[in-house]
């Protein structure tokens, strides 16, 4: 299948629009799950740590399953995967309205909705990259703001729906809204053409493989046929064939009906047994080779000290940086902030500032005089300080200010692909990004429950957010130390004395002459 050249416009802007709305409809409720979190605490009476698993699974499962999501998009296309993910998200939300206990929500909201979000994210990013080349950064930036805008609107919308229709009615209505993903997915026209294959490229690339395939195939078939001949042929037939030559064996084929029957059975064996067996064997060999190559490339990535530090940093960042978006509403309630003081939900502030942060940090990353890796480290260090300041915030104004700072710094997700590309190169970006997203999903899944368990243990969020700030700060310093060029500079300067000595000797000889 041959892909057409990226148009960088045209129908591509329709793809950007529908991808924006699909992320808006899909991620709105899971990212604004903090509003539902308070209701689930009151409805089921479970601990904060256990209840926090619902939202953390919804955010983490999609990232953990990112390799599977990529395979699905490659196999079935972005349109089919988007439509299927729409059914998953809508069905999971509606099913959650009938949840009899918190364990049911782990499956319906955490796993089903989370998996749908992961599939949809991969599909929207993939098809946008196909339609855009020179304007790819702008297109990806626009669609990524869909989730942030969804967080901003759904935080207020879900609170309003709960007041009028209750928790169950809110989930039913939000699930019905998610069905609009199906209409958006139907507009994702694939950018490919099956009318014009690539004969020259295919032929050139496959000639060596085909030669080896047919060479091995002949050996396998000959061995199997020889075994079959030994079982069916008598001693006299074999002697006659060896003594009289090939021409006599042909006459035997015509004269001896037993030999004719044996030849037909041999052909049937070739068609039904030998060839399928051979192709299964070759498929297994190729799959095993792919797994070996993947493991080898993974080991090579982790030999890069900056990449190893980057995966530690993203893991610690998601453990400490994700809980505020889930728990901030409950933090305000625990600080005895009255609902009358709420001008805007804290989660809405986080959402809108995340969108602003994505755009501004993305623009800063395009300046050549700014080191994107150091910019990312700076966002981690400042975020750690903001997390440690949350226990001192006892009013709505201070909590709103910290929510805005945390939301803006969470926008560093927009520069994370830049950092990954700078670390491993564009050739290894897909492989490295998949590994990093897996660890990000693991951090997303573990962060809120850990913070909730700290509260259940101490009956306060103070130690929990000190722990979160320490995690993010540790990740930032590890990445900063790994990225410092001091060791590389020392290594590069070691071999310099040798050529200097050589040049000195040449100069002294010329002076003597």
Image (cartoon, rainbow, N blue to C red):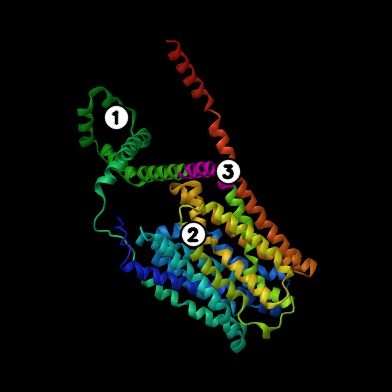
Q: Quadrant of residue 74?
A: bottom left
Relative to 427, say whether 220 is above or below. above
Mark 3 = which residue?
Answer: 305
Relative to 166, say whether 431 is above or below. above
Mark 2 = which residue?
Answer: 364
Name the residue rendered at 75%, 68% in the picture. Answer: 455
Name the residue rendered at 30%, 68% in the picture. Answer: 10
* Residues at marks 1 and 3 touching, judged by CB atoms closer than 8 Å: no
**CA–CA distance between discs 2 and 3?**
25 Å
Q: Is residue 459 left or right of residue 322?
A: right
Label disc, if present, on residue 237 of the rendered structure: 1
Quadrant for the C terminus, please.
top left
Q: Quadrant of residue 209?
A: top left
Is 24 or 186 nearer to us in this picture? 24
Q: Residues within 10 Å of mark 3 (few under 14, many from 20)?
A: some
Q: Is residue 374 left or right of residue 257?
A: right
Q: Find the magenta span and give its range.
A: 290-308
Residue 327 coordinates in the image, percent (x, y): 66, 71
């Amino acid at each position: 299948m041959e892909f057409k050249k990226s148009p960088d416009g045209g129908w591509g802007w329709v793809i950007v629009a529908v991808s924006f709305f699909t992320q808006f409809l899909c991620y709105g409720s899971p990212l604004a799950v903090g509003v539902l979190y308070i209701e689930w605490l009151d409805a089921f009476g479970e601990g904060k740590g256990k209840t926090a698993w619902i939202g953390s699974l919804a955010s983490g499962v999609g990232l953990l399953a990112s390799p599977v999501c990529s395979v699905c998009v490659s196999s079935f296309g972005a349109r089919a995967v988007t439509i299927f993910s729409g059914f998953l998200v809508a069905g999971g939300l509606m099913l959650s309205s009938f949840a009899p206990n918190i364990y049911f929500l782990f499956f319906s909201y955490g796993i089903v909705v989370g998996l749908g979000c992961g599939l949809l994210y991969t599909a929207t990013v993939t098809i946008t990259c196909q339609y855009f080349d020179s304007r790819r950064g702008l297109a990806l930036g626009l669609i990524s703001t869909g989730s942030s805008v969804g967080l901003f609107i759904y935080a207020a919308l879900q609170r309003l729906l709960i007041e009028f229709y209750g928790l169950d009615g809110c989930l039913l209505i939000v699930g019905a809204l998610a069905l609009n993903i199906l209409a958006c997915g139907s507009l994702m026209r694939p950018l490919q053409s099956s009318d014009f294959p690539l004969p020259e490229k295919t032929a050139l690339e496959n000639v060596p493989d085909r030669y080896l395939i047919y060479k091995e195939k002949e050996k396998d078939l000959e061995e199997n046929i020889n075994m079959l001949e030994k079982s069916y042929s008598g001693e006299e037939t074999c002697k006659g064939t060896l003594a009289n030559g090939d021409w006599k064996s042909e006459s035997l084929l015509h004269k001896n009906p037993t030999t004719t029957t044996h030849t037909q059975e041999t052909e049937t064996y070739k068609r039904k047994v030998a060839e399928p067996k051979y192709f299964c064997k070759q498929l297994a060999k190729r799959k095993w080779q792919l797994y070996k190559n993947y493991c080898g490339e993974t080991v090579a990535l982790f030999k890069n000290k900056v990449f190893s530090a980057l995966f530690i940093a993203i893991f610690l960042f998601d453990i400490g940086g994700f809980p505020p978006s889930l728990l901030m509403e409950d933090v305000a309630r625990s600080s005895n902030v009255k609902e009358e003081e709420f001008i805007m939900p804290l989660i809405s502030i986080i959402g809108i500032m995340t969108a602003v942060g994505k755009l501004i940090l993305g623009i800063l990353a395009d300046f050549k005089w700014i080191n994107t890796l150091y910019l990312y480290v700076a966002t981690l260090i400042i975020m750690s300080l903001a997390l440690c300041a949350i226990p001192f915030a006892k009013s709505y104004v201070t909590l709103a200010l910290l929510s805005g700072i945390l939301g803006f710094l969470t926008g560093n997700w927009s520069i994370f692909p830049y950092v990954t590309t700078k670390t491993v190169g564009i050739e290894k970006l897909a492989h490295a990004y998949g590994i990093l997203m897996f660890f990000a999903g693991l951090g997303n899944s573990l962060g809120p429950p850990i913070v909730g368990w700290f509260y259940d243990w101490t009956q306060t969020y103070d130690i929990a957010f000190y722990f979160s700030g320490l995690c993010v700060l540790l990740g930032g310093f590890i990445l900063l130390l790994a990225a410092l060029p001091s060791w590389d500079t020392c290594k590069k300067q070691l071999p310099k004395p040798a050529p200097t000595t050589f040049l000195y000797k040449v100069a002294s000889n010329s002076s003597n002459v």
